């Protein structure tokens, strides 16, 4: 996790109660502000859950007050509790760290695919109009989705064939992602042979 060493951890009691981790504790949770505003926080959470108001709108409203709102303070203290619990779990639980890293790797793989596809104009949105920018971004999403669907279809077919031959190592399947692009010709010449075009219900030969 980025800047993990700079993250602040909080406790309910005095920090000296936790002598073994006292060096990484930075503050104490204001329990009273949470208790005094807990009913309002529950009503707010219910409104967001029912779709009566968006979380972004609430955050904007709470952040616009000239003086900090009591509910905002209560939410901040509750957030500190959740953050502290999560960081301690992250530090002590290797399985959790591996699961998070896998998720981050998948996100970075998609970003890498987007960068590879968006080579025109050096990957920059140079259009001035918002609508033009949205169109270019939408076109990029279409290409990402098309690549992902293509890879998914052929990975599925390859998996079936390997399984039939008894060569499939199923423990490796969770580590396979349809976001690779090394086999896709992003630059250069595109050659099309109408005689070799597969029918709508057929796939191209697999290289296994």
Image: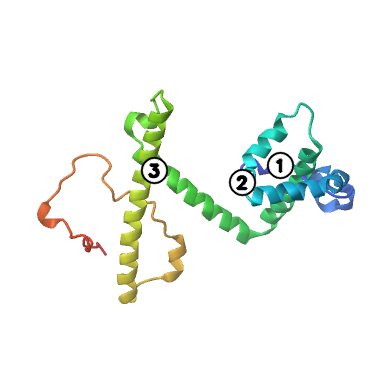
Cα–Cα span, label 2 and label 3: 27 Å
- Residue displayed at 34% across by 68% down: 159
Q: Where residue 201 sits in the image (x, y, percent)?
A: 22, 63
Crowdedness of circle 2 by 10 Å Cα count: few (<14), some, many (20+)? few
- Residue displayed at 61% across by 46% down: 1
- Residue displayed at 16% across by 56% down: 197
- Which residue has dot 3 on it? 141
- Which residue has dot 1 on it? 7
Quadrant in the rendering for residue 166: bottom left
Crowdedness of circle 1 by 10 Å Cα count: few (<14), some, many (20+)? few
Query: Tag 2, which secondary structure?
Result: loop
In the drawing, does residue 167 fall left or right of residue 193?
Answer: right
* Residues at marks 2 and 1 touching, judged by CB atoms closer than 8 Å: yes
Q: Is residue 81 visible?
A: no
Label 3 vs 1, first from the N-terminus: 1
Label 2 vs 1, first from the N-terminus: 2
In the drawing, does residue 172 fall left or right of residue 6?
Answer: left
Looking at the figure, which quarter contains the C terminus?
bottom left
Vertical position of residue 17 compared to residue 199: above or below: above
In the current view of this chain or complex, which residue is farthest to the left?
Answer: 195
Q: Where residue 101 sits in the image (x, y, percent)?
A: 55, 53
How many marks can you see? 3
Query: Tag 1, which secondary structure?
Result: loop
């Amino acid at each position: 996790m980025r800047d993990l060493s700079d993250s602040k951890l909080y406790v309910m009691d005095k920090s000296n109660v936790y002598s073994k981790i006292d060096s990484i504790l930075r503050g104490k949770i204001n329990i009273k502000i949470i208790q005094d505003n807990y009913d309002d926080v529950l009503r707010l959470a219910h409104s967001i859950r029912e779709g009566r108001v968006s979380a972004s709108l609430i955050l904007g409203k709470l952040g616009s007050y000239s003086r900090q709102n009591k509910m905002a303070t209560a939410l901040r203290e509750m957030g500190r509790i959740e953050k502290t619990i999560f960081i301690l779990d992250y530090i002590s639980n290797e399985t959790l760290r591996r699961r998070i890293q896998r998720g981050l790797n998948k996100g970075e793989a998609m970003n890498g695919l987007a960068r590879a596809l968006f080579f025109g104009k050096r990957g920059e949105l140079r259009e001035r109009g918002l609508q033009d920018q949205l169109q270019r971004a939408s076109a990029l999403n279409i290409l990402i989705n098309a690549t992902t669907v293509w890879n998914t279809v052929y990975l599925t077919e390859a998996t079936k064939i390997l399984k039939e031959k008894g060569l499939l190592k199923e423990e490796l399947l969770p580590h396979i992602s349809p976001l690779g692009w090394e086999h896709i010709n992003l630059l250069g010449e595109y050659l099309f042979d109408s005689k070799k075009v597969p029918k709508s219900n057929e796939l191209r030969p697999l290289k296994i």
